[in-house]
Amino acid sequence: MKVLVVEDDPEVGETINMAFSMRWPESDVNLRDTGNGAIDAASTDTYDLVVLDVNLPDRDGFAVLEGIRSVSHVPVIMLTVRASEADKVRGLEMGADDYVAKPFSPFELLARASAVLRRTGGGNNAPQSRVMQAGQIKVDPDSAEVFVNDDRVKLTPTEFKILSMLVQNANKVVTRDSLIESVWGMDPSSADSYLVKLHIQHLRKKLGDSGVDPKFIITVRGFGYKVPA
């Protein structure tokens, strides 16, 4: 497993490196201490996971995330001392898969990393190859591609996982709790209330759907979401 760690504090970077090496002895950790270095690394190599600090000396971490997303769909965990909900929402909106607030426990980071890898199929645990279709939506788990009326739609790994689960259960209601458990690997009672709703909004926008009169992702109030077959 290859991990890109973007952290300008050498001690924090080495702590993360040691934690991943202990949890996954076969892991290959690439440490970068600048945003430009991170984008360059993501552009020239393939990674299973990126751990990205928000506060970097040359570029804001959100700008770095945008740069990484322009070249790769690799799962990204953001490290931030900013605990405000606005910053968390901003990171998720820009394509981050999770966030960990500083100071953090290495064990917490490893748990979050395991959950992200599990739900995105990273770490040599790729999803089975089986093209799924529901109405005008086609999902290819093998290539991680989504098409609407044969037009490709670019999604983040988390958005792809959510849509895959909805399409796989076409015409059936998928509850918020089951999405949190399957996609995020979290206990629904401990998850942020806006987590699923925010990602559904982003999915609808990318699919060209409407929250007022949706045709692709339908909200079943009090239960969850479904896509027509």
Image: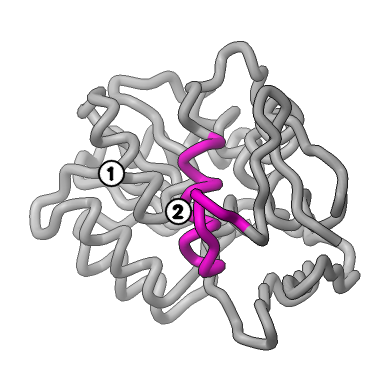
For the point 56% across and 75% down, which residue is it? 153
Residue indicated by mark 1: 53
Write the start and end of the magenta stretch as one range.
196-214
Residue 40 against residue 188 in the figure, above or below: below
Residue 1 against residue 103 in the figure, above or below: below
Magenta-colored stretch includes residue 201 = yes
Q: Quadrant where the N terminus lies? A: bottom right
Magenta-colored stretch includes residue 4 = no
Q: Quadrant where the C terminus lies? A: bottom right
For the point 29% across and 27% down, which residue is it? 85
Label 1 crowd bin: few (<14), some (14–19), many (20+), radius 10 Å: many
- Nearer to the camera, 24 or 163: 163
Point out the residue furthest to the front here: 213
Q: Quadrant of residue 77?
A: top left
Q: Position of residue 23 (x, y in %)?
A: 64, 35
Main SS of the magenta part reads: helix
Residue 28 visible in rendering: no
* Image-based side of 223 in relation to 157, left or right: right
Badge 1 marks a residue whose secondary structure is strand
Q: Position of residue 131 (x, y in %)?
A: 86, 73
Q: Position of residue 186 (x, y in %)?
A: 65, 25
Q: Are marks 2 and 1 in contact (CB under 8 Å)?
A: no
Residue indicated by mark 2: 50
For the point 65% across and 47% down, which residue is it? 117
- Nearer to the camera, 193 or 81: 193
Name the residue type under label 2.
Val
* Image-based side of 36 in relation to 222, left or right: left
Residue 20 visible in rendering: yes
For the point 53% across and 72% down, which residue is it? 154
